[in-house]
Amino acid sequence: MAVTPKPEPKESTLPPAPKLSAEEQKELEQARNGALKTLAEHRRAIAWPIGKWPVEKRVVYTRARVYLPRTYLARYGSDVRAVYPGTDLNQFIHRHYCEEVGKDGRRIEEGKDEKIAAEAKEKEKDRTPWPNYVAAEGILARRNEFLGPDPRVVGYFVDADGDYHIRWYDTFLQDQWMDNRKWKFDVRQDEHGHWVDADD
């Protein structure tokens, strides 16, 4: 008796996507542009100013890292902080950026003795100050003043490692940025044919 090999399952090929006529392509592009404009306006309207207490909660369910740019477009790097399960990410970021800092954006240490304070003042003279977009004198600066004239948090980008990157929108500069690069809104169609945010 001859043994016949078991037939292997074959992957079925997907049918080619239907080709759209020029008119249908134009209608689809117009619908996409309209959805993109509407979504961008909505996201910018609900973006919360970093200097004010956030209205919404964004709870983190796993341990993650948050990249917190020190200045506009992270020209002087980013601080990386760990957040733990149950932390409200919006409140965490608000508290971080409302801390009082020196002219160079570094945290003011309280409770130092006079000798250490004098050494810190000497070091501060040598440091180049970061650009403060709110008060050039920097008498009592907060971290958010180095991010731009009116920085707002639009949302977050979660990378492959599960780390959070803040998406910023500055209403005064009309600029969208994240870490050291610019970003744009984009839309896609979901399984029901509705236009949704491409990152959701």
Image (cartoon, rainbow, N blue to C red):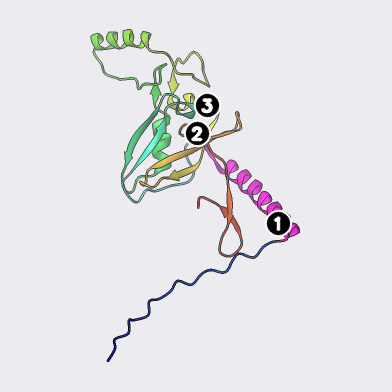
Residue 25 tag number: 1
Instruction: Name, please, the residue furthest toward the right.
Output: 23
The amino acid type found where label 2 is placed reads Arg
Would you name the residue on which mark 3 appears? 148
User: In the rendered view of the protein, which quadrant contains the N terminus?
Assistant: bottom left
Does the magenta segment cover residue 49? yes
23 or 77: nearer the viewer: 23
Discs 3/1, front: 1
Residue 181 tag number: 2
Q: CA distance from mark 2 to mark 1?
A: 31 Å
* Main secondary structure of the magenta stretch: helix
- Mark toward the start of the polypeptide (2 vs 1): 1
186 or 81: nearer the viewer: 186
The amino acid type found where label 1 is placed reads Gln
**138 left or right of 65 in image:** right
Residues at discs 2 and 1 in contact (Cβ within 8 Å): no
Residue 192 is drawn in which quadrant?
Answer: bottom right
Instruction: Name, please, the residue furthest toward the front.
Output: 2
The amino acid type found where label 3 is placed reads Gly
**188 left or right of 69 in image:** right
- What is the tally of numbered marks visible in this picture? 3
- Mark toward the start of the polypeptide (3 vs 1): 1
